[in-house]
Amino acid sequence: MGEVRTICVVGHAGAGKTALAQRLIGLSGVEVELDNSPEAQERGSSVDLGLSYYQQNDQRLYLLDTPGFGEFIEEVYKGLWAAESTLLVINGEKGVEVQTEKSWELIEEFHKPVVAFVNRMDLPNASYSKVIAEIREKLGNQFAPLEWTIRQGDKFVGVIDLIEQKARYFGQSGLRDIPTELRADAQAGREALLEGLAEVDDQLMMRFLEDEEISATEIRAALHEGMLRRTVVPVLCGSATANEGLRLLLKTIQTETPSFAEAQAQGGEAEGSDGLRALVFNVASDQYLGAMACVKLLHGSLQEGATFFNLNRRNKGRVRDIYRLQGGKAEKITQAGPGELVVLTKLENFELGDTFSDREDDSPVEFVSFPRPVFSRSLVPLSQGDEEKMSTALRELAATKTTLQVGRDEVTHETVLAGMGDVQLAVATARLKNRYGVSVQLHRPHVPYKETLMKTAKAQYKHKKQSGGRGQYADVHLRLEPLPRGGGFEFVDEIKGGVIPNQFVPAVEKGVVEAMTEGLLGKYPLTDVRAAVFYGSYHPVDSSEIAFKIAAGQAFKLAAKQAQPVLLEPVMKLTAWTPREFTGDLMSSLSGKRGKILGMEAEGRMERIEAEAPLAEVQDYALELKSITQGRANFQLEFLRYQPVTSLKLIEELLKREGRALGTAAAA
């Protein structure tokens, strides 16, 4: 096999990324459909990482197509990790949009060489010059156009090749002279290109300053070097839907972006290093093939029947079936080499990010740190049949997405699905129905409040019942004390002199534990309490374990009423990254949510804000932040602590939101 390279296609939704990737593959004579899932077709946009490839002679180019909607950012992370370079697609009519900027930030974070393509230039309101100016203003001056547009009225008819200083007209073969009225623009564009490239090569800079002629071959060599150093981003233009300007884009990708071998050498690794080393960069599920491990081969090769070690799971596996994906089609192959992206099926016990090696003592490859989910909804199955299938379906679905997490809340007893926003959860529930036949409803999850006690209190309860025959008798004296936050529960046996026989003390503890499952304010579980049984009495005939359990539970409730019960609410740490123009609005919104600003500092073009706020106030903050900042801010939530709510008015308001009434103990 000759050169292998992978390029990740990123950009804002509607820029035409998927259409462009499909058209580029189509230049090889192969038709491919990338958005073939029912969920993508229903939305009319990508929701998963799409994989296809272009084959020309002994060169193979893999294209990774990513969604342009921010809630599916996980796919961009995975695609950028697996690629040697990036194709940034920009809408020629709308210019730099929210996800264009976010994609650029990730590209910089992953340190990937970039080719930019201004798409949809066939639209009447598309303006190449405005887009170039906006790109340089918002993303940086390293963007260097290799082409300039030729328009006749509102029609996009061709481009000027700034390197060759010739015109290319769509539908016509060969190069033409540049139209007279565009020669000044073409010359200015070429000089701007040379000025940017001159920073890559000192000799080129001297020749440029001395107005010496620089050949197209020298320009392309400097362009390639500039891309590797990430000091130059070549910009091309065209239209994927009209199939215009794509061959030059493909040629630029094949000749100017680094191959896998070149990227490895640049990173200090040899492509031909001995031994297998591959990483699972994506996990998918197919109704026919089952669980699919999409792997990137970093060293060595894979063959059917070969064995390997999963360094993360510490188990041994065998390669059974190998496939190369062409959109929705899986092509079975028998082996794959370095740099290739292939799918392995019929594997057991693997996860996203696992490293496969032929050496058991090898070290796992460092993968990606994904954003944590910030938006949750509880799942309610619509029927008994849905409930029976739901847990298995959710487990399989969550295995394919790190930003989708499923769990059962120990306080509210709800099944909770967490993700990056309402759109991602809507797609996930649609997939549950389409693929697994499970129908669910989404609801705002209840807040997992708890309760605790603020004071020490004592109480006695004597359980005495006589109804003919053997009666019931137990007398329990309890002392309740608050523990530090996070202390949980402690039970202390302080009985002396056998006033309660040893065999009944465990029943006392059991009665206390059961009483703690329902607090006195909102019937939430109590925590951070020490309960000491210090006195009591018994009857040699009528006392029993059940009697002492009942007495202990009642004694606990009596003491708890006197111990100043309060509500405990979960408090979250919130970290937000926002453009500076939205800082004031964001801080104001947090202050209105009982939030506390902890700090603020600049991070590149963004402002980082640290705050804390009750979970009850920020459950839907993903939606609000999107509205406040026009989708340009990001944030992360992390559980911080439980803190007491001492205001009865606030407790009543919070319980009302949860559909609960304030208990009678509030008046005590």
Image (spheres, rainbow, N blue to C red):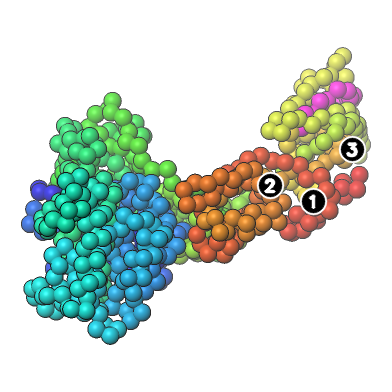
Measure how far apart labels 2 and 1 are at the Cα level. Answer: 19 Å
Name the kind of residue labelled 2 in the image. Lys
Name the kind of residue labelled 1 in the image. Ile
* Residue at 31 percent of width and 54 percent of height: 142
Q: Look at the image and give the residue range highlighted in magenta.
A: 529-544
User: Is residue 503 among the parts visible in the rendering?
Assistant: yes
Q: Crowding at label 1, few (<14), some or many (≥20) Cα neighbours within 10 Å?
A: many
Residue identified by numbered label 1: 651
Q: Earlier in the sequence, mark 1 or mark 3?
A: 3
Q: What secondary structure is found at the residue carrying circle 1?
A: helix
Q: Tell whether label 2 touches label 3 (CB within 8 Å).
A: no
Q: Is residue 410 left or right of residue 450?
A: left
Measure how far apart labels 1 and 3 are at the Cα level. Answer: 18 Å
Q: Is residue 490 left or right of residue 9?
A: right
Q: Is residue 625 magenta?
A: no
Residue identified by numbered label 2: 596
**Residue occupying the far top of the picture:** 497
Residue identified by numbered label 3: 562
